Amino acid sequence: MNRLPTAARRSGLSSFSVRLAALLALAPLTLAAARPVVISGVPTSPVIETKLLAGSKEGLPIWFLPQLGLQTRNKPQDVWLSYGPRSLRYTPQGGWAASGFALPAPLPAPERYGAGGSLHVGLDVLRALGVPLAGNAEQLDVRVVQAAREVPLPVPQFGFNLAPAPATLKVVQAAKVQASPKPSVPKPSTSKPSASKPDVAKPSGAKISINPTALKAVSAPTSPPPVSPPKAAPEKVKPVVKLPSPVKASPAVGHSGSASPLATSPPVTSSTAVSPISASPAAVKAAVNKAVTEVLELRAEVAQKPSLRSASIEPTPIAPPAGLPAPVPTSITPTPVAPPPVAPTTSAPTPLPAPTPPPLLSGPKIVGTRSSLSTVRNIQLQRLVIDLSGPATYSAKNERGGVTLFLPQVSADPNVQTLDSGDTLTLAPDSNGVTVRLDAGGGQSQVSALNDPDRIVIDTATSLSADVPPPINPDALPIGVSLKAFGGLSLLSFDPAQFTPRVVAAPVGVALNVSELVRRVGGVAGVNGGYFDPPSSLPVDFVAAGGKLLAASLERRGTVGFSEGGTTLFGFPRPRYMLTGAFGSLMVNTVTARPAPKLLTAFVGDGKTAVGGAGLLTLTLNAAASGVSKAELGGAVPVAGRISLSFDPARFPQLPTAEGSSIQATLNYQSQEWQGVRDGLSAGPMLLQGGEIVLNPEREAFNVLTGVWRPTRQVAFAIYKGQPTLAFLEFGTPETFARALHNVGVTDALRLDSGSSATVFVSGGYLGTGGYLNTVWSRPVPNAIVLVPTNNTASLKASKNLK
């Protein structure tokens, strides 16, 4: 058997800890470099990679660790990591502290990567927890074993003094005298014992508390009168008095009912020397018997008065042999103590009133509590179950930092405990019921009652980090919304009878979060829309909302459109504005606010952006886009939501130039079936149509070597089992996305702007703020496809770009 080194044995390190320290010491010492992360050989998004921390050590962001099977708390002042039976906790004051194992070597502190970046921990920390890390110089492979939560963390326990000794009980402080050990006990004599020198049994190791008052008689040279033993001596006398701090004496009542004065004297500790006294054995016997009698009387008094009982008095009687008088320890030679004389009193003591016990509650009782802890992305989920012996009612109040419940007519044992999450649970019973308090820090709690068996459940969700978007809570989705996952592919589908897809746009030149675009129109979910120019936030391809063309079409990219009746179309419709009037018909060249002297341009005003320019005439149409409400030369700022036309009158002499002129502007598609479409946008590539993969980068002029074709996060608007669906792929190319959608039965799908723009949001998160399919925050976008409840679509029929 291998033996540990002497230093290791002395320090108490286990063989495993020593081997782990050796492995860490022998880790490759070459210069570390950032590596992409794979999980059991499966690549993650390229966003997930190791980062070089202080000392060129590799690290991973804490928000990513739950994907590796760890439980985490991601707070700079209190970092907590758990993997299987092992856990580590870091505080700036104490550094790393281990639970379930011994730290073989100091570990580096967590650190942020970059200014305001995510909090990272070094790979050495993960190795110490036992996370299986492998790979090579090109990638880090985490061989995850899904057993991170099989062994729960220990729950700290706290003891409580549930019945403290009453403060009103005053005990005479007496000297403790130790008798001779293991004395021989003589056989009882058949003759009548002598009154002066009776045969007695020496007590076996008994501790006897002697009243100092009784010792006064011992110091006198005269012999006291004989003392008869108690009438009914118990089998064994072993009075043990636990002395509190010195208090004034209160009178004790004897058998006769008269008051016996009790004096207070300083306590005699175990280190006090006991010296012999000059007294006859008869005097010693009398003094000791009197002390024993007083102790028995005091014990009887306490037994008769429950209000005077205390856990600090535990008398145990000693049995004398049959037929013998009360025991006298002949070997006791206490030092005489002369207490100050106390004048006796003849008045009987006023008995203390017994406390009124709380009324017995007739309802059920809390018979136990149990909790579980899990982590979903950056959300820590705790379920606390309060088990009851029967059905009970409750009232709940969510307060800052926790939740308080009151259960009337319910009983429980008082208790305070710290849960695995660090939250504190308090049970405080009283005569009316039980108050339950859960201090959950920054978490949000929901309370529900269940039966068979009867119990109350408190579910608490706590955000561990704002570095990543919160996940979707499948149990909190709106009615009519379903979520299905197929590995890295997720499909969020909507009942077409309850929800209608609409295109929602931000103000011109503005980009907003998808969640904000959803909120502005009262929707329940949304996905980012088409491509745009990041510096200006202007769309680069077709966008229409409420029958108005907000951005011109490139006329070659895949497009999705939504009719007023809720029909969804996929295709290449090549939309344009068509002008009709007394002059006949004319097609608008493009949609832009920029001056274009050679073109006929259109623009939907936002009340701020200027159009036209020198030598150009701008016509602002009325709300119905059926006539000229204003004609301006040299530039203008159209009214928000109104269509404006800018052109050179010399190039387009057929167009009207005066206010009040009749002219009609309509959104026209070159495909007849699209003529009823009021909302739509172009993106691409088109992935599926009619159940078949139709990917064709040449047709849509996409470069397959760069840009859109790189592997990244993918989003699409699709039709799955006849329902409008938002599709999200964690990582892949347009080809892998198309195949994945086809394999699960999606019939139609258009890829939308993906990568850093990819966002799928739905109301129904764990903290009431909604959740995301994307695991990384995405950038704001100028437009989105939003699912709106059908009863809200009436207000969107004439929707325009939002202010």
Image (tube, rainbow, N blue to C red):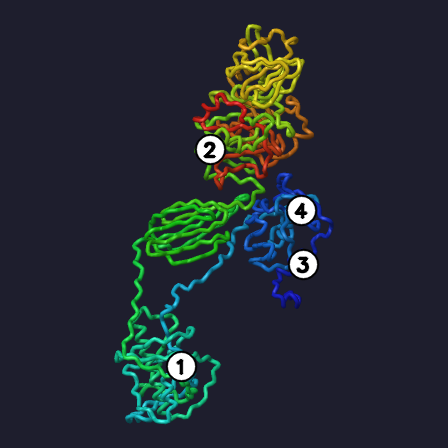
Q: Is residue 35 above or below residue 539?
A: below
Q: Residues within 10 Å of mark 3 (few under 14, many from 20)?
A: few
Which callout, 1 or 3, points at the residue further toward the start of the chain? 3
Whether residue 720 is visible, yes or no, is no
Looking at the image, tell me whether mark 4 or mark 1 is earlier in sequence order: 4
Q: Residue at x 42, y 75 (%)?
A: 246
Is residue 148 toward the left or the right of residue 451 in the image?
A: right
Question: Any mark on residue 135, and which?
Answer: 4
Residue under label 2 = 481
Instruction: Using the numbered discs, state the Cα–Cα distance from disc 1 to disc 3 in whole angstroms.
Output: 59 Å
Task: Identify residue for label 1.
Answer: 206
The residue sitting at 56% across, 15% down in the picture is 620
Quadrant of res 759: top right
The secondary element bearing badge 2 is classed as strand
For label 4, count other residues whose C-alpha is less than 10 Å away and answer few (under 14), some (14-19) or many (20+). some
Q: Amino acid at mark 1?
A: Ala
Q: Nearer the viewer, mark 4 or mark 2?
A: 2
CB contact under 8 Å: marks 4 and 1: no
- The quadrant where residue 39 appears: top right
Q: At numbered mark 1, what does the secondary structure look like: helix, strand or loop?
A: loop
Q: Using residue 165 as the reference point, say whether residue 517 is left or right of it.
A: right
Circle 3 residue:
22
Spatial separation of the CA atoms under disc 4 and disc 2: 40 Å
Dot 3 falls on a residue whose secondary structure is helix
Dot 4 falls on a residue whose secondary structure is strand
In this picture, is 691 found above or below 618? below
The amino acid pointed to by label 2 is: Val
Q: Say which amino acid is labelled 3.
A: Ala
